[in-house]
Image (tube, helix red, strand yellow):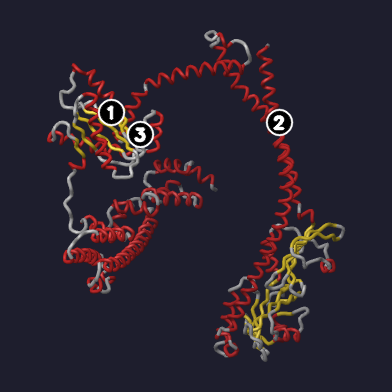
């Protein structure tokens, strides 16, 4: 009973604490989020409607600019002069040219050109007198002949709404509201000689508006600078023209007004280019309808979160108690062995148990500490073998094993004892000596020994502090100290082989290998000698001027078009020359050898034309001058080689990929057949395709065939076997397994899913 009361009390505390942790920030954040979300959403709705209107304004301005540009082009087109229009032969060509201009704009219903002092007006359907145009082609409800002629003599571009225009044709008359855009020609001429007139159907403009505004249910108006309605989209017919005239349209942005007892929202945008006004008028309830829906959604989400929070509090409280209960049950199983755990609640019992575990852990640590020497030896052996290449891992292991190493240079020595120094009778002596060498502290250095278990030899990893003078001299000072230390311990002067110096711990194995190499030379040295690896290294024969490897590197970099390597190699060669004490004759011979190597390589590549004046290069006055001339030549050659290589690769890639795309349905198509077709090696072609496409030839071919199969499965009713064979596969069953592995379904299932 006591246990159950404790359990209930602990569980209750956990649930209440989680509820408090959740509710306090939840209530504060919910209030902030609600008011911020509503305000932000209101601003977004208003800005969204303004953006849509600005989009309409921008699109309309672009269309008007297109028409102005067309008018300018017409005015300067020699094929559209009064002479060309009136000429019996060229007039038809002029009309055809007008049709081309009309086709340049999607909003033009008809295009007219009128020249002053001429009764004829020209359009894409032919030429008419003003009377014939108004009688046979169009009938304008409120646009009289005199007004039309006066408008055609305008000196400034303007737009005129023309309502209830009757367009006559042979079948039936068509009634449309038109927008006439008149543009005097030539542009910016104070005395224009004609006018270009465009007819635009009002429905064309309203369609543009509707496409941008989408499903908006309000009214949309476009007014010109004279407040004449050019185009409109009417969804709410309860608003008449008088009410419209009284609205505040000159204000940019969003306004609220009351009409017919209802609240309306007005969004107004004015074009800086044309002074047109773009206006939407919508009921406020509809304007902010999405806001009401969002408010309900936010409240619903907060309520759901509150319920979820309560459930989570109960769930987390139980989960918080469950581990304690499990741990308590485990501790009760060992109470017979640990009588001191009796009494107290679960937490007290757990505390005592953890204390016992900690004590056991300490005992285990002591046991592990006893095994540290073995781990130390294993680590040092791995270091000698180069099995650990990561510097951070090496430092971590050094810290874990408490091995102290300096952070300067590192080298390895092999201590060789004379054969027979240690035998079965004095193994304890050998053990004593080798133990004494396992850790040696020197001035500004430490040495760690590893028994090599052969030839009575021991390896010492020596780490040095950073030195300001020559590290090699410091090494030559330390090695004799090591030899003296060994003599002091066992009265023996061993032969010591010394490897090279390195600055990184992960390169200690190089020094170890170099130290081992000295074992072959200890027979030629007296006992107690110190043999440095540098002394037994074969010295390369001195080359004349610069190493031949540099010349080979320069030639290859030229052939590969590598500017960086070529320039760097050339600089190294001349730097090498400048540092040598050579006679003038020898120096010139070397310079001519460099020139010859470059010129020969350039000639072999067929780029001799870039050596414009060989005499200028050969007639150099100094090494610096020759270096500059050759540097410029080298960069030019590399740039040309790289350009040709890129161009060649592009053409070859296109040819190869086009060939594969044209022939992938052939079952015999293979990497070998493509290589034979383009006269390339199979290995080169394989690498080339992988480099250009990112996938192998087999994968690329499979992708093409898979896409064709999927296309035919969706678009045709051909049998699956026929499709598979048609794209180049012979084994239908194998293809089906492959298709399912890649796509996830069989070909038949894929066809059913995509029908």
User: Gap in Å between the C-alphas at discs 1 and 2?
Assistant: 63 Å
Q: On the image, numbered disc 3 is attached to which residue?
A: 405
Q: Residue furthest left?
A: 524
In the displayed structure, would residue 659 be above or below residue 168? above
Could you tell me which residue is drawn at 32 percent across and 59 percent down?
562
Query: Is the residue marked by circle 1 packed among few (<14), some (14-19), or many (20+) residues within 10 Å?
Result: many
Q: Check disc 2 and report its element: helix, strand or loop.
A: helix
Tags 3 and 1 touching, CB below 8 Å: no
Which mark is in front, 3 or 1?
3
Q: Earlier in the sequence, mark 1 or mark 2?
A: 2
Could you tell me which residue is drawn at 25 percent across and 33 percent down?
481
User: Gap in Å between the C-alphas at discs 3 and 2?
Assistant: 54 Å
**Residue nearest the viewer, comparing 52 with 522:** 522
- Indicate the position of residue 25 as horizontal and vertical percent values: 70, 37
Q: On the image, numbered disc 2 is attached to which residue?
A: 20
For the N terminus, which image quadrant?
top right
Q: Residue furthest right?
A: 261
Which mark is in front, 1 or 2?
1
Q: Earlier in the sequence, mark 3 or mark 2?
A: 2
User: Gap in Å between the C-alphas at discs 3 and 1?
Assistant: 15 Å
Could you tell me which residue is drawn at 29 percent across and 33 percent down?
461
Q: Check disc 3 and report its element: helix, strand or loop.
A: loop
Query: Is the residue marked by circle 2 packed among few (<14), some (14-19), or many (20+) residues within 10 Å?
Result: few
Q: On the image, numbered disc 1 is attached to which residue?
A: 450
């Amino acid at each position: 009973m006591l246990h159950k009361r404790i359990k209930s009390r602990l569980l209750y505390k956990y649930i209440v604490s989680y509820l408090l942790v959740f509710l306090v920030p939840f209530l504060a954040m919910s209030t902030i989020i609600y008011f911020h979300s509503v305000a932000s959403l209101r601003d977004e709705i208003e800005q969204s409607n303004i953006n849509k209107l600005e989009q309409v304004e921008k699109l309309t301005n672009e269309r008007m600019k297109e028409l102005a540009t067309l008018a300018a082009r017409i005015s300067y087109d020699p094929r559209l002069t009064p002479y060309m229009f009136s000429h019996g032969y060229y007039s038809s060509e002029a009309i055809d040219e007008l049709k081309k201009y009309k086709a340049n704009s999607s909003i033009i219903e008809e295009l007219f050109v009128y020249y002053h002092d001429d009764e004829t007006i020209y359009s894409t359907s032919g030429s008419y007198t003003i009377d014939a145009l108004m009688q046979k082609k169009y009938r304008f409800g409120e646009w009289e002949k005199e007004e039309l002629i006066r408008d055609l003599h305008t000196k400034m571009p303007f737009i005129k709404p023309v309502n209830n225009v009757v367009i006559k044709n042979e079948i039936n008359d068509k009634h449309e509201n038109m927008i006439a855009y008149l543009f005097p020609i030539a542009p910016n001429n104070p005395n224009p000689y004609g006018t270009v007139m465009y007819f635009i159907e009002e429905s064309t403009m309203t369609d543009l508006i509707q496409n941008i505004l989408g499903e908006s249910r309000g009214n949309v108006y476009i007014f010109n600078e004279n407040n004449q309605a050019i185009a409109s989209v009417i969804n709410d017919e309860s608003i008449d023209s008088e009410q419209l005239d009284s609205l505040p349209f000159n204000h940019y942005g969003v306004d609220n007004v009351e009409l017919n007892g209802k609240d309306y929202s007005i969004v107004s945008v004015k074009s800086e280019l044309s002074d047109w006004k773009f206006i939407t008028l919508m009921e406020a309830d509809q304007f902010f309808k999405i806001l009401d829906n969002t408010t309900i959604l936010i409240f619903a989400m907060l309520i759901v979160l509150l319920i979820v929070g309560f459930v989570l509090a109960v769930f987390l409280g139980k989960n918080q108690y469950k581990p304690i209960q499990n741990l308590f049950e485990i501790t009760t199983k060992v109470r017979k062995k640990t009588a001191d755990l009796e009494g107290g609640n679960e937490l007290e019992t757990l505390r005592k148990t953890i204390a016992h575990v900690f004590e056991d852990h300490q005992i285990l640590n002591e046991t592990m500490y006893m095994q540290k020497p073995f781990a130390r030896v294993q680590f040092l052996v791995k270091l000698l073998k180069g099995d650990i290449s990561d510097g951070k891992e090496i430092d971590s292991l050094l810290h874990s094993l408490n091995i102290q190493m300096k952070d300067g240079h590192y080298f390895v020595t092999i201590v060789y004892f004379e054969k027979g120094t240690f035998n079965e009778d004095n193994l304890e002596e050998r053990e004593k000596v080798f133990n004494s060498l396992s850790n040696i502290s020197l001035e500004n250095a430490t040495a760690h020994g590893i028994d090599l278990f052969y030839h009575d030899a021991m390896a010492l990893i020596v780490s040095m502090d950073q030195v300001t003078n020559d590290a090699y001299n410091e090494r030559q000072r330390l090695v004799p100290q090591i030899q003296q230390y060994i003599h002091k311990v066992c009265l023996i002067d061993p032969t010591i082989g010394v490897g090279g110096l390195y600055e990184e711990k992960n390169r200690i194995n190089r020094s170890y290998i170099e130290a081992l190499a000295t074992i072959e030379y200890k027979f030629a040295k007296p006992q107690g000698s110190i043999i440095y690896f540098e002394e037994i290294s074969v010295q390369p024969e001195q080359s004349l001027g610069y190493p031949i490897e540099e010349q080979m590197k320069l030639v290859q970099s030229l052939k590969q078009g590598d500017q960086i390597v070529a320039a760097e190699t050339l600089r190294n060669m001349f730097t090498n020359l400048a540092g040598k004490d050579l006679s003038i004759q020898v120096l010139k011979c070397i310079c001519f050898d460099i020139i010859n190597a470059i010129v020969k390589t350039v000639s072999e590549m067929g780029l001799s034309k870039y050596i414009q004046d060989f005499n200028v290069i050969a007639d150099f006055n100094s090494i610096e001058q020759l270096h500059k001339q050759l540097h410029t030549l080298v960069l030019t050659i590399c740039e040309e080689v790289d350009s040709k290589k890129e161009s060649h690769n592009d053409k070859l890639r296109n040819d190869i990929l086009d060939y594969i795309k044209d022939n992938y349905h052939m079952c015999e198509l293979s990497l070998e057949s493509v290589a034979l077709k383009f006269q390339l090696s199979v290995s080169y072609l394989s690498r080339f395709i992988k480099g250009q496409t990112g996938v192998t030839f087999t994968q690329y071919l499979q992708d093409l065939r898979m896409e064709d199969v999927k296309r035919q499965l969706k678009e045709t009713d051909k049998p699956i076997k026929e499709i598979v064979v048609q794209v180049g596969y012979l084994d239908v069953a194998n293809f089906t397994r492959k298709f399912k592995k890649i796509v996830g379904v069989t070909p038949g299932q894929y066809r059913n899913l995509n029908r």
